[in-house]
Image: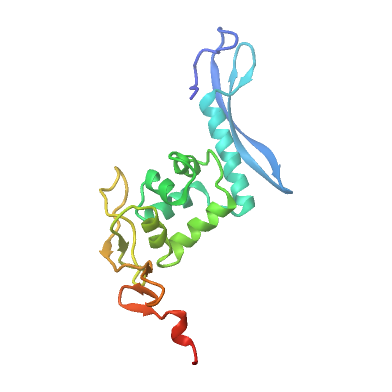
Amino acid sequence: MAKNGDRCPICGEGHLTVQVDKHPVEYKGVSESLDSYYSVCDACGSEQADAAQTRDNKRLMVAFKKRVDGLLAGAELRERRERLNLTQKQAAQVFGGGPVAFSKYEADDVAQSAAMDKLLRVASEVPGAGAWLIRKAGLGPAVAPVEWKDASNWSPQREREPGERPVELRNVVDFPLQPQDASSGYQSSGWKTPAPEAFSHG
């Protein structure tokens, strides 16, 4: 990112002064003033934004659109991913979007779809939902945060990433139904769903 005193890349003579102004924006009828990062040359007077400033300005706009659309902000996405005890790569395996999708979502580089947003909310708020998705993604044995006393199973245990806060976990029971044969119904841990003919009346 440009710093005060950097040589102007346009005229090659002046020096830059970093500026932060408010820039009015509108999206779907909602107006707001967002910070806008740029630099001004003291020689040629040009206003310019380098790659880092352009990136930051774009992220602020994406975050604004997320708010208007009712989508989770990048920081909220990260909190929910960590609540599920998933890395960004694992989250992409569970929810889709590609190997670097969650890095982009959490940085507000791009907005997640409404469908993805709803799935993340359900997975992180409904006991057992996230567990089922994680298990379907083939991520192995599952554990759950201790406060989720009704969760059926959860995410694979792993070492925390640098700077990541600890999450207290406990082992839990299997949730997904395991099919048996058509005559005996479906077997799960500790209970059984009767086959349809069990309800016939003669």
Question: What residue is shown at x 38% (from left), y 66% (from top)?
Answer: 176
Please indicate whether residue 165 sits to the left or right of residue 93 in the image. left
> Relative to the observer, which residue lies in front, 17 or 101?
101
Foreground: 11 or 126?
126
In the depicted structure, whether residue 102 falls above or below residue 150: above
> Compared with residue 105, is residue 41 higher up or lower down, i.e. above or below?
above
Residue at horizontal 40%, vertical 45%? 88
Above/below status of 46 relative to 112:
above
Residue 169 picture location, percent across and down: 28, 61
Q: Position of residue 125 (x, y in %)?
A: 45, 64
Q: Position of residue 7 (x, y in %)?
A: 51, 12
Kindly indicate the quadrant of the structure image that contains residue 183: bottom left
Numbered label tally = 0
Q: Is residue 160 left or right of residue 113?
A: left
Please, which residue is most extreme toward the front here?
A: 202
Please state which of residues 4 and 96 is positioned toward the viewer in this rendering. Answer: 96
Q: Position of residue 135 (x, y in %)?
A: 36, 58
Where on the picture, by quarter, is residue 103?
Answer: top left
